[in-house]
Image (cartoon, grey):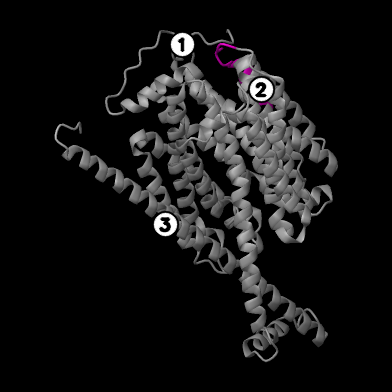
Amino acid sequence: MSNQPAPDQPASAQPSSDQPDAQAVAASAQPAAQPAGHPPLPFRWAVAYMLAAAVIALSQGLQQGFVVTNLGPLAGDLGVTTATSAWLYIAYTIPRAALPVLLIKVRTQYGLRRFAELGIVVYVIVAFASVWITDFRSALVVQVLSGAAAAPLSTLGFLYMLEALAPEWKMRLGLPMALTVLLGGTTIARVVSPVLIGDGGFFWVHLTGLGLAMVSLMLVFFLPLRPIPRMKVIERMDFLSFGLITIGFGGLIAAFVMGPIYYWTDMAWIGWMLILGFTALVLGVITELNRKAPLLDIRWLASPAILHLTATLFLFRLILSEQAAGAPKMFAVLGVAPDQMTTLFAIIFLASLMGGLACVAWMRPTRVPWFHLIALLIIAFASWLDSQSSTLTRPMQMIVSQALVSFASMLFIPPAMLSGLLIALAKGPQYLLSFVIIFISSQTLGGVLGSGLFSTFTTHRQAFHMQSLTEQLTASDPQTMQAIAGGAASLSGQISDAGARVAQATSQVVQSASAEAWVRAYDDAYLLTAFVALIAAAMLLLHLLRDLMARRAQTDIPGAKP
């Protein structure tokens, strides 16, 4: 059997009369993902390419998720502190966010097939090396290489999903499904990590990553992407621009990951990292603005439409931090083990899948604002539900709210990306993949910044609530004395010394107060998230009403086209 699937017959796509805009977008997208002269794939090959897209996207998503969700166990496995292990996440995220920018020209100059094959080979080599990690330094190096190797895999996940579909289904089906798998990696990692880690450390985690990488390697070579025209576009100045962008992203990522851990004002180098990051990005922008063939079209990115879309996506990433940096960390404070949260995260992933299917069924370019409005209202309601949490709350009590957040996220992100693709295709088909890669980089960076801000807010509120509770824990407070006396009595069968029992009971009261302060802090963050989502929904609704009134006024003008 040939490696290149032979189509059975030429394309004969029949546009649907109820979605002309989506058909036009898909047809315009054809040169980027399916060159002219290439008919749609037969059904059996289309299914194979879609499954390949899912495996490739899941492979890189799980690799990232294993790092994000297991920093504590990783620290113990490598013999370092939890704060030190956070550098592993930083080392992975910096190339993961920056490298896609350079890959725009790499793909154009060397072609899709070389781009895919080289990317997946490097990824397999890195996955193999990760199995033999023995110390923190080697882990740090492997994480840098893992982030660099995973960068092209996100793009490959999109390309393989779009390759499989006829033009009229590329945006409607391919986009939501690709995003569902790409964004679900961290959630799936939380489901499978407790089983893989067990008592044997991270050997099975690394072996799982290696297995998925090798399966992806087989799929990429067995199901090659169809070629596109190549051009020599890489210039020496590209590497200067890329270096500045990498330093800029690196400074911001390091600061926003380590800032909440050490707290921003306690370490001077965190401020210097922010300064370095912003300065490098400014220099990168200046460099790109003065080039004839830049890596990034800064003027296009700074256009009102793209700036509005970027601000919308960044705001939504901040809102989604309620799920990424909220519930998992709150349950960790309450002493809930990771294996007790697997059901919760399994349902969260299923809810995101349902959201993706809802986009497949109803997403159209004209309905994007309404999808966003519904998503914001759902998140506001779910966050309000979460704000009622207490120290007795457990994962089963948050299944409904967290599933709603996950469902709403998939109602928001695919339509938002569809809007961006419409803007990119209006500029020209060559901007399609550029927007996809920029979207991936911005979402990676936005996720880090959002989680950092969310964690900073909860830390600040925890200190406030802890101070308030500490003022109540006095020797003259009857409730405090009663709690200590009850705790000491319960320890009588374990500790014979009365003074030691009182000391232990006092420590337990302080720990309970600390847990209470943390839960109140997270409740404040959930409530703030609900408030921000409601404000965003109100602004969007006013915008929709303004557009509706403008259209009605236009139709009232004699001779005006409706």
Residue type indicated by callout 1: Ala
Q: Position of residue 426 (x, y in %)?
A: 42, 25
Q: Using the numbered discs, state the Cα–Cα distance from disc 1 to disc 3 in whole angstroms.
A: 45 Å
Q: Which residue is mark 2?
A: 217
Q: Residue at x 53, y 66 (%)?
A: 389
Q: Evaluate whether residue 166 shows in this view.
A: no
- Stretch of the chain drawn in magenta: 214-230
Question: Does dot 2 land on a helix, a strand or a loop?
Answer: helix
Q: Which residue is mark 1?
A: 36
Q: Residue at x 54, y 51 (%)?
A: 318
Tell me, yes or no, whether the two marked residues, 3 and 2, touch with CB atoms within 8 Å.
no
Q: Which residue is mark 3?
A: 534
Along the horizontal axis of the image, is 504 left or right of 178? right
Q: Give the mark nearest the N terminus, 2 or 1.
A: 1
Q: Give the mark nearest the N terminus, 1 or 3.
A: 1
For disc 3, the neighbor class at 10 Å (few under 14, some 14 to 19, many from 20) is some
Query: Split into 4 quadrants, where in the image is the C terminus?
Result: top left
Q: Nearer the viewer, residue 456 or 132?
A: 456
Q: Using the numbered discs, state the Cα–Cα distance from disc 2 to disc 1 in whole angstroms.
A: 27 Å
Q: Give the mark nearest the N terminus, 3 or 2.
A: 2
Relative to 191, does residue 112 appear above or below in the rendering?
Answer: above
